[in-house]
Image (tube, coloured by chain):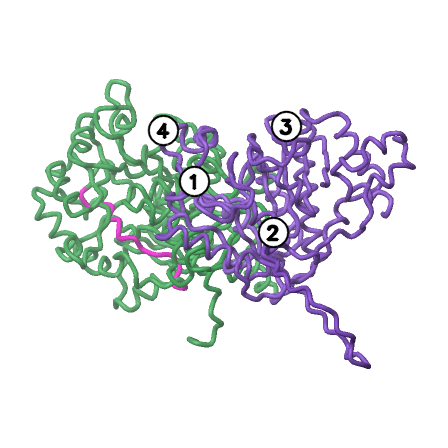
Chain colours: A green, B purple
Amino acid sequence: MPGKTATPPRITKFTNCRIIRGNQLVEQDVWIDSLSGKILRDQEAFYELHMSPDEVLDLGGRILAPGLIDVQLNGAQGFDFSVPKSSKEEYDEGLRMVNKGLAKTGVTSYLPTVVSSTPEVYWKVLPSLGPSGAKHRAEDGAESLGAHVEGPFISPGRNGIHKTDVLRAAKSFEDVVGCYGKENMFGPSKTVRMITAAPEVGSMVNNIPNLTAQDIIYSIGHSDATYEQAMSATKQGATMITHLFNAMRPFYHRNPGVFGLLGQNEHRRPFYGVIADGIHLHPTSIRIAYNAHPNGLILVTDAMKLCGLPDGVYDWTNGERIVKTGARLTLEGSDKIAGSSATLIECVNNFRRWSGASTAEALNAATATPARLLGLEGVKGTLDCDADADLVVLTDAPDPYSGPTLTIDQVWKRGVKIYDAEKEATNSRV
Amino acid sequence: MRVIIRETALEASEYIADYIISRIKAFKPTEDQPFVLGLPTGSSPEVIYKTLVQRHRAGEISFRNVVTFNMDEYVGLPRDHPQSYHSFMYKHFFSHIDISPQNINILDGNASDLAAECASFEAKIARCGGIELFLGGVGPDGHIAFNEPGSSLSSRTRVKTLAYDTILANSRFFGGDVDKVPRMSLTVGIQTIMEAREVVIVATGAHKALAVEKGLEGGVNHMWTLSALQLHQHPLIVCDRDATLELKVKTVRYFEAIEQSGTDARTQGPPLVYRPRTYVPAPMGASKTNQQPTPASTPPRVPKDLRINTQLNQTLDDEELTPDSMSSRMVDSAISGLDSTLKGDLMFDRMGTRVISH
């Protein structure tokens, strides 16, 4: 009920905590302002405005990190971004539920990802998936930074579990615009932030400059591109690779394919998504990629709506069905992997264990690096002054089975605490 | 003069932190009667701040009712520049304690009228009733605050040009570029420090040894501004062993003997008195008005002393606790025979008296 809840303290100071500075954890206080939803220029506020914290939180040496950013997420809580509902209201209601659920896993912003679909589906769902921007309230939970459309301009041979019937090839930029809908690509109503497409399909390579001109990220993925084709896409402005190794031509020593982009120095090496769920990739593959291009690695979950649901057979898009066995999801009647059901913090833990990256480096791969890809440096994925106060409090404790493990204790969105594991535990006990 | 010697810089710093805490606690500051603390910057004080912050976190001390005045600040350096003393104080002390920002006073090196800024700083000190305890460091050339060698010993808060030595020394904080070091600073004067009821100086490291020697054993001299404290009533110098390297063995032993005989400086500060927050233009003279009971009969007429105190000296309000001198006690001391030699020329009388009276 509005007005019934007590107003949260305006200025909160986190102390006795470790934060990320570059590739290290350092001890430093962080001040946030729930009014502006930003991280305070604390010294200036102190001397100039005579502000002092209304609340001081002693984190007891725990880690304070920026809220996690997931650039590839298909759904959660039984809700799938790619499945339109009977009405927009119903769809938006499901989306709200996802946002709240996601926030509890430490993900404070993300790119809702729509898999290959018919144009009608894009026209229906994309208007709901655009960036929430300034109207986003803390209690809404995770925030969309714009939609990620994965397909349908992908290689039929590297479709993964995307339905081949809906795949298409773009002859011109008009084909691309027509598929997603003009209002989703241009102007203030723009909802698309990133497109995954195969450069070798149709004339996609020539469309890349048109996309980047609209400030839409072009990501190479679901592609059978050779090294040369991948290079020409990079030359045209591709800055990302969608789930590296998965759904692409494998590395071959005479032609390294898309993976070869991480070894070249001709163009800027692209960022690349990695699904570190222990099913999609062998730990050593992740390590090889990380060693080749450490600053470009972005952890993604590629999680889908079944995340958190019990084992069984579930309906999926386009009338197909998915079998869930533990964390493993496969398409019914095949053993093709159908996305993951891992959370991003689990991926961070796996990645840290496998790659030898420091805690700060592992967290950067889910915070600062995706923010850099999205052009949100200094706004998201950082605890620098004036950045959005999206934070997670993490405990780094040894787990008897898997070694040091980060767990989410608290989640803060725009300066307001929206999740507290401790409180949650007390509530469930009652 | 009280001198405390500790083996290491850390121990010396901890001693001072303890001392400050005990003084604030004994004062029992309230919102209306805050404890007024003068503060320095520098590498030696940094350790003190660290200790104070630890004690604060442990819940031993609150700075809620403490008002602070900082000694100095560069002129023309942006307030939030990483090397400004605002930044230093924020980073090492203020951001970690419960002091309220309104209670912090640091000179504004970017004020449009620097002279007015200095005058208002002095006035603010006066309005708070003067500084209770002034903590300070000392430079290798004996300077306290930015009162470089040659500063007037009766100086007040003012603009001061930095000595070349200081610019060279501080260039390490500006990427080794001498040209980036500000040329001027605002600083409290020697007289401002001398008017604090108590002055505590930290001197650690061998490079401070000469300054300590000149300040303690030399005469009062504007080339070693530390020596002005010889004229102060309640100075306390805390050194590490290295900082005593240039002192006479006799001087060191003397101060050590005082401490060993059970005198703890932590119980020896001046009486803590709250001074009313009235505006008194600096320099400040304490007033003493004792309400006399109405006499039974008309008192006999006594010729009044009509002279005006033009020196504006401090009154004897804050005088020594014990009137006798150390040398008078030394007749009976182990150093018999020295008393006649020492009589009248040893300046360390006050501490000697404490040895016995404690």
Of the two numbered discs 1 and 4 in the rendering, the one whose residue sits closer to the viewer = 4
- Residue B63 is situated, as x and y percent measured from the top left of the image, at 61, 56
Q: Are marks 2 and 1 on the same chain?
A: no
Mark 3 neighbour class, 10 Å CA radius: few under 14, some 14 to 19, many 20 or more: many
From the image, tell me which residue sits under label 3: B209
How far separated are the C-alphas under marks 1 and 4? Answer: 15 Å
Which residue is drawn at the image coordinates 15% and 58% (left, top)? A183
Magenta stretch, residue numbers: A139-153
From the image, tell me which residue sits under label 2: B195
Q: Quadrant of the N terminus of chain B?
A: top right
Residue A289: image tag: 4
Query: Pointer 3 indicates a residue of which chain?
Result: B
Q: Amino acid at mark 4?
A: Ala
* 2 or 3: tag closer to the N-terminus: 2
Q: Secondary structure at mark 3?
A: helix
Mark 2 neighbour class, 10 Å CA radius: few under 14, some 14 to 19, many 20 or more: many
From the image, tell me which residue sits under label 1: A277
Q: Secondary structure at mark 2?
A: loop
Q: Is mark 2 in CB contact (under 8 Å) with mark 1?
A: no
Q: Is residue A325 visible?
A: no
How far separated are the C-alphas under marks 2 and 1? Answer: 69 Å
Q: Amino acid at mark 2?
A: Glu
Of the two numbered discs 3 and 4 in the rendering, the one whose residue sits closer to the viewer = 3
- Residue A267 in the magenta stretch? The answer is no
Viewer-proximal residue, A251 or A352? A352
Q: Amino acid at mark 1?
A: Asp
- Residue A416 is situated, as x and y percent measured from the top left of the image, at 44, 61
Q: Are marks 2 and 3 on the same chain?
A: yes
